[in-house]
């Protein structure tokens, strides 16, 4: 049976499409992108922080301009110095990864902290990760908990899952299974459509549909699998193997590999009638967009 998982995203906004359009469409889009980037470049050079951030994204994924992490970091830094929170998050992530700049955990913290202090939920989540792992700052579960909580209260699905993890293991906060379940439920019951829409807070930020969907899907699926574990062991809730199977089944459907393994374990343990009921409830939950689980 799975061990509860701490999600460590350190998300970089606007990182790359994976879908390849047809050749003709690709050429047309490339031409349109190039024209658009000329306008963006003019605005960026004039000091527009939004355009600088947009141009940084373009260089980061090679949209309309040659792909260049170095150029991406330059433009993110210009925007970040003007207080652009998303640019600060991305610049922090680039320092953390060593993409386009020398790897530097302390600089990663500096820029991530700036975004977090502005109330950006991904800055807060990434800063929580840094404290949880002791990267660029002394390891401090209490600080990790504080920053996860700030982001979780804004609806950040990754932070909600991590907050559940912190409560379950008593990291930075007294152990509390009921609170762990409560936060896993908040994350697990976010529909993918709702989560993706939430990540599209500003359509102009150049988030790709692929990245949005994958971030939402992975974070939610992990929380769903963790919630299944809580029901399986009766942690913070009454033990309910049918509900555990339901959440494992939903998480597996959403791509969680460990949940797939746990579902197979239960397939060997549970009577067929219980499995059928759990599968029925899973489908009802999915069909109801997580409103009837």
Image (cartoon, rainbow, N blue to C red):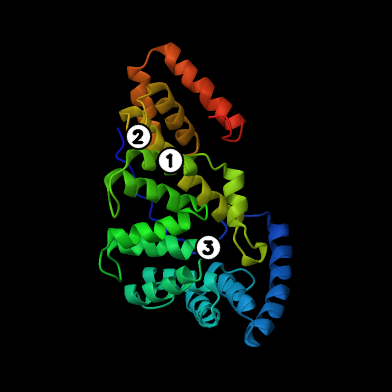
Residue 15 numbered tag: 3
* SS for dot 3: loop
How crowded pointer 3 is (Cα within 10 Å; few <14, some 14-19, many 20+) is rated as many
* SS for dot 1: helix
Q: Is residue 213 above or below residue 26?
A: above
Hey, which quadrant is residue 142 in on the image? bottom left
State if disc 1 and disc 3 touch (CB < 8 Å): no
Residue 22 lies left or right of residue 126; in this view the side is right
Q: Which percent across, then down, holds residue 170?
A: 27, 48
Q: Which residue is identified by label 1? A: 182
Quadrant of the image containing the N terminus: top left
Q: Which residue is identified by label 2? A: 236
Comparing 160 with 32, the one in front is 160
* SS for dot 2: loop
Q: Separation of disc 2 and disc 1 at Cα?
A: 9 Å
Please name which of the two marks, 3 or 2, marks the residue nearer to the observer. Answer: 2
Q: Which percent across, then down, holds residue 205?
A: 62, 66
Which residue lies at the image location 70% right of the left edge and 79% below the top edge? 38
Q: Separation of disc 3 and disc 1 at Cα?
A: 31 Å
């Amino acid at each position: 049976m799975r061990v509860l998982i701490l999600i460590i995203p350190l998300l970089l906004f606007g990182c790359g499409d994976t879908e390849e359009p047809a050749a003709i469409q690709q050429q047309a889009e490339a031409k349109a992108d190039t024209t658009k980037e000329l306008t963006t470049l003019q605005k960026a050079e004039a000091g527009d922080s939004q355009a600088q951030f947009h141009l940084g994204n373009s260089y980061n994924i090679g949209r309309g301009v040659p792909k260049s992490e170095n150029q991406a970091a330059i433009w993110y830094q210009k925007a970040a110095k003007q207080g652009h929170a998303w640019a600060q998050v991305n610049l922090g992530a680039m320092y953390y990864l060593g993409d386009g700049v020398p790897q530097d955990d302390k600089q990663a913290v500096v820029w991530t902290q700036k975004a977090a202090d502005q109330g950006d939920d991904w800055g807060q989540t990434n800063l929580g990760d840094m404290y949880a792992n002791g990267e660029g700052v002394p390891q401090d579960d209490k600080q990790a908990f504080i920053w996860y909580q700030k982001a979780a209260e804004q609806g950040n699905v990754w932070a909600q899952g991590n907050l559940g993890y912190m409560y379950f293991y008593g990291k930075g906060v007294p152990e509390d299974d009921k609170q762990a379940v409560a936060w896993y439920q908040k994350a697990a019951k976010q529909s993918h459509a709702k989560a993706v829409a939430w990540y599209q807070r500003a359509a102009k930020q150049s988030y790709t549909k692929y990245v949005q969907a994958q971030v939402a899907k992975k974070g939610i699926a992990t929380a769903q699998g963790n919630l299944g574990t809580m029901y399986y062991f009766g942690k913070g809730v009454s033990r309910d193997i049918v509900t555990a199977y339901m959440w494992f089944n939903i998480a597996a459907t959403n791509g969680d590999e460990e949940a797939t393994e746990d579902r197979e374990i239960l397939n060997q343990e549970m009577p067929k009638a219980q499995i059928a009921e759990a599968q029925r409830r899973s489908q009802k939950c999915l069909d109801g967009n997580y409103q009837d689980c």
